[in-house]
Amino acid sequence: MSAYTLRHYLFYWNRLFGRQRNSLQDLAGYYLPSVSIIVPMHDEEAVADTILELLVTMDYPKDNGWYEVIAVNDGSKDRTGIFIDTYAERYPFIKAIHRPDGGRGKSDALRVGTEAANNEIILVFDADYQPTRACIKRLVAPFRDPEFGMVMGRVMPINTNQSLMTRMLDLERSGGYQVDQQARYNLSLVPQYGGTVGGIRRQVLQTLGGWDVYTLAEDTDMTMRCYYNGWRIAYVNVAECYEESVLSWKERRAQLTRWAVGHNQCLLSHSGAVIKSPVLSWFQKIDGLLLLGVYLVPVLMLLGLVLSIIIYFFGAYWWWLLFAALVFTLAYNNIGNFASFNEVGISVVLDKRGRVIWLLPWSLFNFFANVWLCTGALIKSLIVHGNNVTSKANGETVNGSVKWDKTVKKGIHKHNGKVTKLPKQKDD
Amino acid sequence: MMRRIYLHRGLWSMQPQILHMAIGALFTLLVALFLVYRIELLWDFQKTIIQKLLAFAEVPYRTTRLPYVDLKQGIPVYYQPGGNTFIIPVKYQVLGPNQALLAIAVLVALGFVSYRFKIVPLPFKVLILFLLTLIIATILYTTFVSALPPHTINKLAIDWQYSGSIILLLIAVIFTFSVFPVKGPLWVKLLWLTVAFLYAITWNTVRISVVLSSLYYLGSFIFLLAHYLTGIYIDFLYIVAIYSLALAHLARLETSEVGW
Amino acid sequence: MFLGLLCFVPGLIELLRARDPGPLSVDLDRDIDERYFSRAFRQYLNRALALTPIKSSGTEEIAVSMNRGLERLKVVNEDLHLASETHYKHSLLIRGNLTTENNCRLEGEICVEQTCITGKNNNILALYGREVHLGENNIVKGWVDAEEILEIEPNCTIGSRVTAGQRISLKGDADLKALAAPVIVIGDDIEPTRPFEDRLAPPQWSADLDRLVITNFDTQTIEEIGAYIERSVGKSIPYSNVLRRANQLGLIEKPLILLNEKQRPHFIKDKTWLQAGDTIRVKGDVNIPTGERIAGNLIVEGNLSTEPAVAFEGGVHVNGSVDLGAGAVLAKSLVARGNITLNEGCIIEQCCDADGDLYVKSGTRVGNSGTGGLSSRKTVFIERNTLIKGKIYGENAVKTAQKI
């Protein structure tokens, strides 16, 4: 826990006052490799047109197959497929892939999309994302450095004012990207590829054996495999992209559980390889392990709370010991726990925002939810990991425990009203 | 005249205000020296207020001073001998084993219902479960272990007076590293540091008074809960709140660079 | 209780009477445009003129709303010649050509729809023209942009972006910040020294050659295999190409393998790994001898130096400094955390990025078809007779000189 505290303060100091690496953005737009963009979609009719329209208007050379969009309709039951087909008919660089028997999870959809991709760089966007026009140019810029195998851009919620939840997530995202990811990139540690608004060099993906369809967090899985095999992950803080945040605790529960289980799977699968990696420094290895263990922190905090109750009733009460313990507990409780709040705080300063930070104490409610969900996720991940080991050992190609655990998108915020609307079907 | 331009938020950082940080560090040092050498002043002041509050709440009490604790015992931090503490008559409450088990069963059922109740947001469900756990632990302790609280009550006040004093040092440290280096005028930082100090002292004084009163009026059971819940964890809350006000203030005053 | 709940009150106020509720503002339509300042200025002009009717001939002075507020704009519907020591405080829109003599001081932005030729020692805020010729010792505080061609005489200082739609020519020493154009010539035009493709033509692997690699890969060094291939079929194959082919043939299976002494080229002494079959990672300094050819990418965790005429088929990343020998050819990009020196006649097909200073010697060519460029987080020093197709950016400055 103290390691996480130190890490948070290091990140805060580095991001606010350190020299910022700009992920080779000085020459963004002057390096234009061929790009394949995969958009996995599963029941995305509310948002499909927005993302496709934005990818159509993207500022990137689109001739001769240099730019292709691969929209994977993965077992959708709604009109997602019609949207995709309409765009594919209209624009030659959009490829439609329909998988009526799909629906086995995002990583499986990505695997299929990757098989259809022809270009050097593979980027991934979720269907509810809204990238800026320059986003692709900015995301591909770091790939001119052969050391970078993956890239990640900045995610920003668009529907911030819809509920307390969305406002909390807005703050969480700010701290996570503006401070945490950028600082990790500055310090040559491990910025995490988040599964969307990012991508990978096609050759690296092939060498590493493609997306792991057994995991719930194919993003963390690929990040770690890249990392300990010698590639760095670039974080491009200026490649900004809106996302639609979840609105209810029910959706948040499903989302966070998925992330936590997937992350914990990666912890179980990759910790050894991180420690053994010959191309990572000790500092990098420690950061890799801390990143992998990040969803264990709320569990440890729950343990801490339980222990505090036990100690409260049965602990030693020699008062000099109490005093020494008091100093440490107070120091950790305030300075330690404060570290992550501090990150969020300065992210607001860096983003030149103001009063939104008044909501910071309300993040404690998020904390309570995280403690609960991450504890449940830890138990679930142990079961899932066991199942996966068995499935892999049996040579099964499809993992039954991995499926789309969908966050339903509302498509409330359309981009400048420019999206193409399909005529309503007769049976609508 | 140049045009005002804004550096992209993704790329800019700021120079740490080292002078402000040094002032913060100096302030922290002064607080530390005060805590080591002149802490009685604060405690005497707190005692005066607490006495008034207890008198207002009609809680009978007497004050005493705890004995000196030497440096060796006080490792790692030296602290001053004794402090004011309050001794009050205590009402001990004990449930019978059957009553306790029944109460626990009701609480467990309550926890289950609240967890299944869709209208309750998840964080509140978790909070309720945590509170129920604490209540159950308290029932189990008072019923099956001891009717007496696990620590002597007369040490409560001194315990919290210490924590209420140490927190001043921690606030100074937090502000020195997290607020003072941030770009912005010094007066804003000093203003919010002062607010944090005042809040900490007020909070600590009120906390002792309220928990002592709850012990007198509501008995040891509620005291155990109140003592735990308003313990050291709550300080964090107001530190974050005041920190957020300070940063919002600084962010508002932030100016941009000028140029073509 | 009250004091505890009080901590949530500021947040509650922001929730109920939100002052900062929206998402971070992002202009989804904004693209990367090096000529942004110039375009923004002309957009202001167009918007202002659309609202203010003006004469179609002669000269007129009008008040227009610009980015700084209301200000004076002089509209000249014909050619304009400014005598020495002329001092203008407001902006100028010239429909014809503009010529200035020496020591003019123009404190507003200037938009010239035809050609602009300035004399010596002019002091200008910002300048746009179809064709622009900046005289000696001009100081431009802001940007300079030409729709087609921009020529800059020696000893000019320009504080912001220097851009052109077609070509920028720097005749002599200059102190700049950033330049962008499909063609940027410093000094005189240079001829490509030798056909780039010839030097980096990939080897044609036949079934026989593959068999040679498969049979000998475990028993011989890659240099021996290379020599063997040369003896057998008369083709010179670079060592790293043998390694790459071995990977393609499935002889190297893991994504990251430590190369033994047999597998790594003789000039690499430190620990070396092969990543993804096409990237060599070296933990230490590397000095590449004359005429070597490196297939795939190269990552050097120390410093990199090369002797003349080395060719790289892929990109290069260096944690330390780079000294690229004369006539080196690099098919992709070069990125270094330290300083980079590109000696005489180097060719870099894509980009070159240094965290330290970047020294570019004469005869160097960087970029291809408007994509490519040089960037430094410190200063870019460029000798005359270099050709950059794309962009040059120095966070501190871009300085050109006869000799650096």
Image (cartoon, coloured by chain):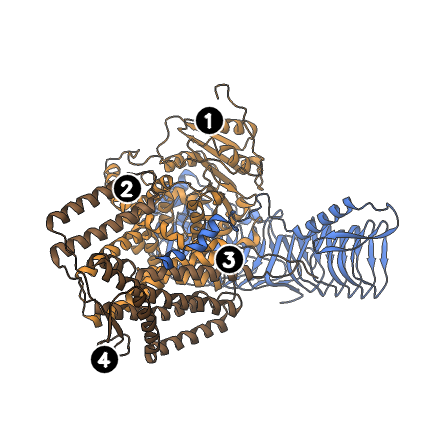
Chain colours: A orange, B brown, C blue
Q: Which residue is mark 4?
A: B70
Q: Which of the two residues, C205 or A316, is positioned nearer the viewer here?
A: A316
Q: Amino acid at mark 4?
A: Asp
Foreground: disc 2 or disc 3: 2
**Residue A350 tag number:** 3
Q: Which residue is mark 1?
A: A79
Secondary element at image label 1: loop
Left or right of residue C29: residue A129:
left
Q: Are marks 4 and 1 on the same chain?
A: no
Residue A154 in the image, given as x and y percentages of width and height: 48, 49
**Residue B114 tag number:** 2
Quadrant position of the N terminus of chain C in the picture: bottom left
Q: Which of the two residues, A324 or A398, is positioned nearer the viewer here?
A: A324
Residue C193 in the image, given as x and y percentages of width and height: 62, 54
Q: Is residue A249 visible?
A: yes
Q: Are marks 1 and 2 on the same chain?
A: no
C263 is higher (above) or lower (below) than C383: above
Mark 4 Cα shell of 10 Å, populated few (<14), some (14-19), many (≥20): few
Residue C305 in the image, given as x and y percentages of width and height: 49, 62
Q: Earlier in the sequence, mark 3 or mark 1?
A: 1
- Name the chain under label 4: B
Q: Are marks 2 and 4 on the same chain?
A: yes
Tell me the CA gap for discs 4 and 1: 77 Å
Tell me the CA gap for discs 3 and 4: 47 Å
Mark 2 Cα shell of 10 Å, populated few (<14), some (14-19), many (≥20): some
